[in-house]
Each structure stands twice: as C-alpha cells, then as structure tokens.
Image (cartoon, rainbow, N blue to C red):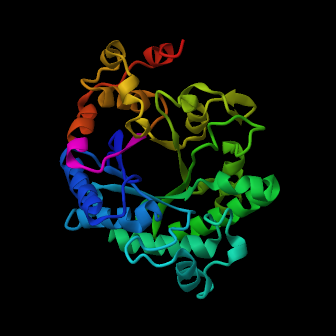
Amino acid sequence: MELSSLGLGTYLGPATAEADAGYAQAARAFLTAGGTVFDTAANYRGGRSERALGAAFAGQPRSGYFISTKAGYLPMGDGSTGEDPGAWFHRVLEAPGILRAEEVVDGCHALAPRYLAHQLGVSLGALGVDAVDLFHLHNPEQQLPHLGPEAFHARIQQAFEACEGFVAAGKIGAYGVATWNGFRVPPGQPGHLSLERLLLAAEAVGGAGHHFRWIQLPLNLALPEAFLAPTQAFRGERMTPLQAARAAGLSVQTSASIMQARILSQLPADLVAALGGATPAQAALQFPRSCPGVTVALCGMGRPEHVVENAAVLGLPKVDPALLSGLFG
C-alpha cells in the first residue's frame, strides 16, 4: 500500500455521538480524497475515536488503509457509560489480573505486557480489524522520571518483547514509540529518549530483524525541533531526530501539524504563499510533510470540511528543504 503523506488524526473532541459521526464522516471523505493513513489511540475520547474509525472502515477493503494506534494511557472508562474511573479500573483491569495499581505511573500510564495485550485486543475489536499496521507505545517517556534510566529501559525492553509477540501472532505489522517530548529535548533534559538505546532494546528481543520500525513526534512551524535540533547522539554523531531516524532506517509520523489550529492566525500571507498553500492550514501542513525523513504528517480532522481543505495538499509538490531551513534563519 502507498502511504499518503498526510494522515488523519483522531485525538481531539468531546465524547459525544456527534463527534463520533463527524470522525466517521471525515474518515470516509479522507479515503475518497486519496488518504490512506489513520492514527488513533485506545484512550482517545475514551475509546470512541477507535470505534468511529471502525464504523468508517466497515465495508472498505482492508488493503486500502493503514492504521496506527497506541497503548500506554489508561482510558479510565469506555467513553459512554460514565462509570466511575476507579470502579472501571478495578472491574476491567485490576480484578482480572491484567494490571496492578503499582504498575501504573502518575495514575494514568502503564506499559506492563499484560496491559498492552489487553489494550491491543480492545483496539482490534473497536476498529473491526484482525490486525493493525502499527502499534505505538504511547509517550513512554512519561515513566522515565519515576523509574530512572536503567529500570525504564528494562521496562521498555519487556514492552518491545511483548510487541514482537504481537507481530508473531499476526496482530500488528510493526511497532514504534509515539512521543511528545522524548525525541525533541536534548540529552540531560527530563524525559529525553535516546533512539540509539531504543534500537538496542529492540535488537535484544528481536535480533536484526526486529519490528521496531516507526517513531512519532511533534513537528510544526512552532515546534520545529525534529527538523532543526540535534537532540540525538547516534553512531557517534549529533543528529536531529529526523536525521537519526533516517540513518536507522525508521519511518516517521509527525503529529500536531497545525498545533490544533493555534498557529494558523499567526502565518503571514507571504509565508503561506512561499509554502505553496492556498490557505494557512495548507501552508502549515506543507512544512512537516516536506521535511526530509518524514513519512506521514498527521493532522486531526474531525469533520468532512476539514478533509476537503487539508487533503488538497496531497496534490501539491513538497517544499525545497533549503527554503524550510531558511524560515528559521
């Protein structure tokens, strides 16, 4: 399958039937417009985003779309019944022996293999598929300050081992890590993730043929670190996250492409024109999708009208990297 350079994200929105319908309609419109990549997570809108995509995919050939989902955060409910979060945790996770309270960090995050397997099963059911193409550990850096580096990497290795098992079972095609701060901040800063060390963990459990194939991190005109900042020490050199991923042969999803629309009002007309977009949103999307090393730039699209505007960039040529670098002086 050819991956579209723009992907539809499903993070934002209330846990309502109206928002569900909007996402399902947007997903169908995105498929019609030539989009093939969809990103979600088990905790997005209490699981309702996955179910909305599942409704959109019904009747569609499975070969026509690429799904990435994530596990790590606790949904703390099913997004519809209004069950008390504590009661939900005990009933769904603690009582059946899936997750112990001491395995939860910050009251919201867990990477225990049993929990990852449970969440993957929930995701497959919600999406209505037998397998997802990509399964991310969701913001694993959340656990780093609490565990310390050695215990954290031991936990990551256990999670990667579980993911290799999911691949072997035919439930996922590949796995990765979806981060916010991890790759953007430099070594020595809280939450920094070393891509090189993550690769070592993958090799330890999967050998040279491991299935740690993707990373996800933010990239937009307000957060350009993935493109500009040499935050990664890789093979004896300092590299940007995108450079390190390319050197490692990893594919990259970038998130927050228009910063939840907050940057659009700040884009001057000459910048919009230089990036080749007809609207501020299109110009903003042109930046991440054009950065060398980016496979897919993700953008939340919860209504068909969002898709009509944003998917137009699929027909635009990518911007010269020299022009992109010049935007920042």
Q: Is residue 168 above or below residue 8?
A: below
Q: Is residue 83 rendered to the left or right of residue 127?
A: right
At horizontal 63% and vertical 72% (from top left) the residue drawn is 113
Residue lying furthest bottom in this view? 95
Quarter of the view holding residue 279? top left
Of the 4 image quadrants, the one containing the C terminus is top right
Magenta-drawn segment: 296-307
Query: Where's residue 198, x and y in %?
Result: 68, 50
At horizontal 75% and vertical 37% (from top left) the residue drawn is 187
Q: Nearer the viewer, residue 17 or 23?
A: 17
Q: Is residue 286 rendered to the left or right of residue 294?
A: left
Q: Nearer the viewer, residue 86 or 31?
A: 86
Magenta span contains residue 129? no
Query: Where's residue 80, x and y in %?
Result: 37, 73
Query: Where's residue 37, x and y in %?
Result: 34, 50
Magenta span contains residue 298? yes
At horizontal 29% and vertical 51% (from top left) the residue drawn is 302
Q: Is residue 144 rendered to the left or right of residue 206?
A: right
